[in-house]
């Protein structure tokens, strides 16, 4: 029974925009084991009657579908939501997105006992079985995330659009809700004893916006912050050398701002370590070097996309514009201020996160990566 109920739950999760982790033509065995660690067979059987975003269901609907008493169904769903393995909001429930499924052991206090084993399974289904590709982009190469440039690095005469300023996302967060939650990617590699950036970057946090901020604060997984605190945190992370990622859209009222390194992040590693050239979208800026370059090599060390080089006999650093993601992290600590960002239109950006998700869902469904939404 247990294998069949987890397979059925995986089939429901497979309706998500990114689909579910697979190995060949079937679900990844590591992913099925991962689900088994978080749901009892009885819980998995009931959760498999839920849908995925945006189809939230009331307990009464799940009870009708499952043929079980409403009181019993409501009790189980409340417990699952409190544990954070499904999402509950205002009496309605939905299966979590893959991001929350995979990161639950890193952010849920009640799942801390399974973190070690869960981390090993993550490495199996996410990295070895290749699910990272669909976590980062669609089967057609549409990126889910994009980098936002460092504003103060942009040449003064260059136009800066609102969606190219991190302040605009913070100011438009729904309900004005902002919260910091420990980064699950660096938390995972730290726990596994594999974090290569320990001497360069803190574990730090992700900045949650809107509904995401409300939910993590309610569960005690994050702390509320003010606008000023959020902006100060952004600057601190950029100074440390982390790249800022948002949804690949102009509007993101409910979402996550990530601060990513090149050795732990589930998105940036698509470029820095793995083979996904569309792991995330570039900004419409590129780094340029002026004649003030002192050839010190600081920028080379800062760029984990290997977009900047410095030959032994060179008088200045050289930027590979094809590899440059336009984040601006290299410019911040240049001792002679020889690096700056200049506009280079190269990426189309979706108007909304919903439009982006719909496009990715269509592309993944056409490729057989996901099941149709019921």
Image (cartoon, rainbow, N blue to C red):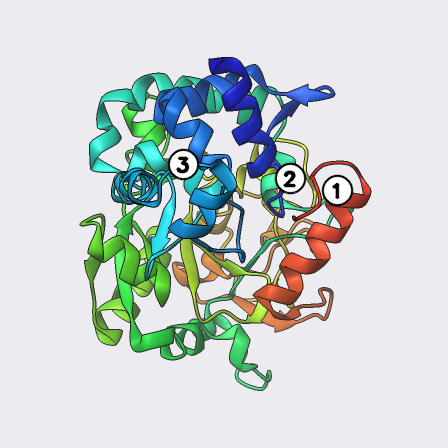
Contact between marks 2 and 1 (CB within 8 A): the answer is yes
Q: Is residue 5 above or below residue 357?
A: above
Task: Give how far apart the Cα atoms at labels 3 and 1 are.
Answer: 38 Å
Q: Quadrant of residue 232?
A: bottom left
Label placed on residue 134:
2
Contact between marks 3 and 2 (CB within 8 A): the answer is no
Q: Which residue is mark 1?
A: 139
Q: Is residue 26 above or below residue 135?
A: above
Label 2 SS: helix
Q: Which residue is mark 3?
A: 68
User: Which comes sooner in the sequence, label 3 or label 2?
Assistant: 3
**Residue 242 shows up from this direction:** no
Task: Please state which of the two labelled residues, at mark 3 or mark 1, is closer to the viewer.
Answer: 3
**Residue 61 shows up from this direction:** yes
Label placed on residue 361:
none
Q: Which residue lies at the image location 41% right of the left edge and 62% below the top edge?
A: 332
Say which of 341 and 78 sits in front. 78
Mark 2 Cα-neighbour bin, 10 Å: few <14, some 14–19, many ≥20: many
User: Which comes sooner in the sequence, label 2 or label 1?
Assistant: 2
Query: Where's residue 43, x and y in %?
Result: 37, 29
Contact between marks 3 and 1 (CB within 8 A): the answer is no
Mark 3 Cα-neighbour bin, 10 Å: few <14, some 14–19, many ≥20: few
Q: Which residue lies at the image location 34% right of the left edge and 30% below the top edge?
A: 188
Task: Give how far apart the Cα atoms at labels 2 and 1 are.
Answer: 7 Å
Say which of 264 and 28 sits in front. 28
Q: Is residue 239 above or below residue 352?
A: above
Q: Which residue lies at the image location 27% right of the left edge and 51% below the top edge?
A: 181
Outermost residue to the right: 366
């Amino acid at each position: 029974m247990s294998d069949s109920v987890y397979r059925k739950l995986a089939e429901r999760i497979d309706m998500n925009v990114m689909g579910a982790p697979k190995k060949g033509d079937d679900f990844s065995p590591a992913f099925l084991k991962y689900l088994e660690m978080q749901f009892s067979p009885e819980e998995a059987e009931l959760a498999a009657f839920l849908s995925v975003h945006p189809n939230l269901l009331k307990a009464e609907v799940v009870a009708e579908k499952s043929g079980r008493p409403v009181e019993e169904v409501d009790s189980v769903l409340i417990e699952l939501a409190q544990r954070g393995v499904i999402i509950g909001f205002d009496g309605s429930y939905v299966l979590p997105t893959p991001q929350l499924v995979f990161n639950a052991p890193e952010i849920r206090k009640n799942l801390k006992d399974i973190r070690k084993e869960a981390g090993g399974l993550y490495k199996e289904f996410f990295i070895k079985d290749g699910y990272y590709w669909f976590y980062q982009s669609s089967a057609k190469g549409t990126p889910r995330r994009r980098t936002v440039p460092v504003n103060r690095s942009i040449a003064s005469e260059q136009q800066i659009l609102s969606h190219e300023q991190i302040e605009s996302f913070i100011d438009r967060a729904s309900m004005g809700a902002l919260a910091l939650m420990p980064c699950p990617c660096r938390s995972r590699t730290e726990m596994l004893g594999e974090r290569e950036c320990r001497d360069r970057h803190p574990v730090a946090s992700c900045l949650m916006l809107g509904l995401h901020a409300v939910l993590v604060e309610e569960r005690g997984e994050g702390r509320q912050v003010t606008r000023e605190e959020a902006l100060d945190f952004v600057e601190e992370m950029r100074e440390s050398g982390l790249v800022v990622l948002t949804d690949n859209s102009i509007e993101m009222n409910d979402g996550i701002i990530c601060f990513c390194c090149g050795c732990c992040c589930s998105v940036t590693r698509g470029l820095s370590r793995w083979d996904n050239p569309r792991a995330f979208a570039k900004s419409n800026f590129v780094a340029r070097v002026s004649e003030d370059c002192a050839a010190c090599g600081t920028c080379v060390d800062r760029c984990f996309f290997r977009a900047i080089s410095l030959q032994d006999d060179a008088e200045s650093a050289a930027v590979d514009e094809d590899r440059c993601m336009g984040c601006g992290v290299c410019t911040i600590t240049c001792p002679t201020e020889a690096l700056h960002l200049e506009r280079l239109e190269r990426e189309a950006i979706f108007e909304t996160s919903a439009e982006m998700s719909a496009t990715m869902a269509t592309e993944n469904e056409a490729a057989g990566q996901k099941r149709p939404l019921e």
